[in-house]
Image (tube, helix red, strand yellow):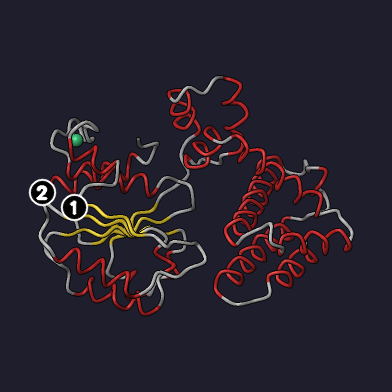
């Protein structure tokens, strides 16, 4: 089910009805906004045998097969691990599959998640698909880092931006899933307009607990001595944290600081105790540094412990 993103939906549904869909779309915006869910719902809509009022019926054989990822004209490609690149053979395989006529739907649809993880060769191969598109095929690229894609891809693809969703939409969705007032008041302050997080926190409350812990850690680190910071860096670089978890922590901290920045602008000089020594400039610098460390640990073989030591020393 779709939460929010109505403008994007109406635009694409109208394009599909008018027969004006391009061969490739790029869905971009922050993580956890529901871009992949949107793409799956859109694939249902295009293939649905009984669509009504601009939405898929969810009940026909095509809608059900897509939900179960068993539909022959629908494919999701994503890297096995977040630390792995999407290789050229995966893109070649995908294009080959798209070259066959659809089995039963009007068009074949492929969703390529985490598209920024395509290697240079994979991106060049994908570019050829964009230059000579196949007939009855649609590829939807999904990414939170559009500028990691080749400029030649970006200039040839129709881009659809996704934004955080209004709190009321998320609240309504969670209430329909059975969340009570207490769960809602615990979850909503921590989702920042991201339906994916809301669903995660509702289905696995330990994830919310963990997120709160990392948020508290940031406040503690901001006031900690060097010994504590080095110990923390050593711990994060250790075996109990993997690549995805380290990236998640960096993401949580960026979001914390963005919210801090926002509250400074909204509430003027009133300062949160733990970050009272942070100026607006300092917060902006920290956000930039966190993003740099994120791309360093993603794209290079940098020593992870060293990267976190540099980060935590400057916090
Ligand atoms: Zn249907």
Q: Residues within 10 Å of mark 1 (few under 14, many from 20)?
A: many
Q: Quadrant of residue 139?
A: bottom left
- Check the picture and name the quadrant holding the N terminus: top left
Q: Work out whether 81 lies above or below 185.
A: below
Mark 2 secondary-structure assignment: loop
Residue shown at the point (81%, 46%) measured from the top left: 274
Q: Quickly name the residue at label 2.
A: 104
Q: Position of residue 129 (x, y in %)?
A: 22, 72
Residue shown at the point (14%, 33%) measured from the top left: 50
Taking the image as shown, residue 187 lies to the left or right of residue 276, namely left
Q: Work out whether 66 lies above or below 99.
A: above
Q: Cα distance, mark 2 to mark 1?
A: 7 Å
- Check the picture and name the quadrant holding the C terminus: bottom right
Find residue 63 and name its label. none
In the foreground, 266 or 77: 77
In the foreground, 259 or 100: 100
Q: How many marks?
A: 2
Find residue 73 and name its label. 1
Taking the image as shown, residue 27 lies to the left or right of residue 94, namely right
Q: Position of residue 119 (x, y in %)?
A: 41, 75
Q: Position of residue 110 (x, y in %)?
A: 26, 57
Residue shown at the point (57%, 58%) measured from the top left: 244
In the foreground, 155 or 231: 231
Q: Quadrant of residue 76?
A: bottom left
């Amino acid at each position: 089910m779709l939460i929010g993103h109505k403008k994007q939906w109406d635009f694409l549904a109208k394009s599909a009805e008018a027969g004006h869909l391009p061969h490739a779309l790029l869905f971009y915006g922050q993580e956890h906004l529901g871009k992949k869910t949107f793409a799956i719902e859109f694939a249902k809509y295009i293939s649905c045998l009984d669509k009504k009022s601009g939405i898929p019926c969810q009940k026909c054989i095509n809608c059900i097969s897509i939900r179960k990822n068993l539909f022959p004209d629908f494919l999701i490609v994503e890297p096995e691990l977040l630390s792995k690149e999407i290789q050229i053979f995966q893109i070649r395989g995908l294009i080959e599959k798209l070259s066959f006529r659809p089995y039963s739907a009007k068009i074949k649809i492929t969703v390529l998640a985490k598209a920024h993880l395509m290697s240079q060769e994979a991106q060049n191969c994908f570019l050829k698909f964009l230059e000579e598109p196949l007939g009855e095929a649609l590829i939807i690229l999904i990414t939170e880092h559009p500028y990691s894609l080749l400029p030649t891809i970006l200039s040839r693809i129709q881009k659809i931006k996704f934004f955080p969703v209004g709190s009321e939409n998320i609240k309504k969705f969670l209430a329909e899933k059975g969340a009570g007032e207490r769960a809602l008041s615990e979850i909503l302050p921590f989702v920042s307009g991201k339906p994916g997080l809301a669903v995660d926190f509702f289905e696995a409350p330990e994830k919310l607990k963990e997120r709160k812990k990392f948020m508290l850690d940031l406040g503690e680190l901001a006031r900690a001595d060097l010994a504590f910071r080095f110990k923390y860096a050593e711990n994060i670089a250790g075996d109990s944290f993997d690549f995805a978890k380290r990236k998640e922590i960096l993401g949580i901290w960026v979001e914390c600081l963005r919210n801090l920045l926002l509250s400074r602008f909204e509430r003027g000089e009133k300062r949160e105790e733990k970050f009272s020594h942070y100026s607006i400039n300092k917060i902006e610098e920290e956000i930039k540094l966190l993003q740099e460390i994120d791309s360093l640990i993603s794209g290079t073989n940098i020593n992870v412990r060293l990267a976190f030591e540099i980060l935590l020393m400057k916090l």
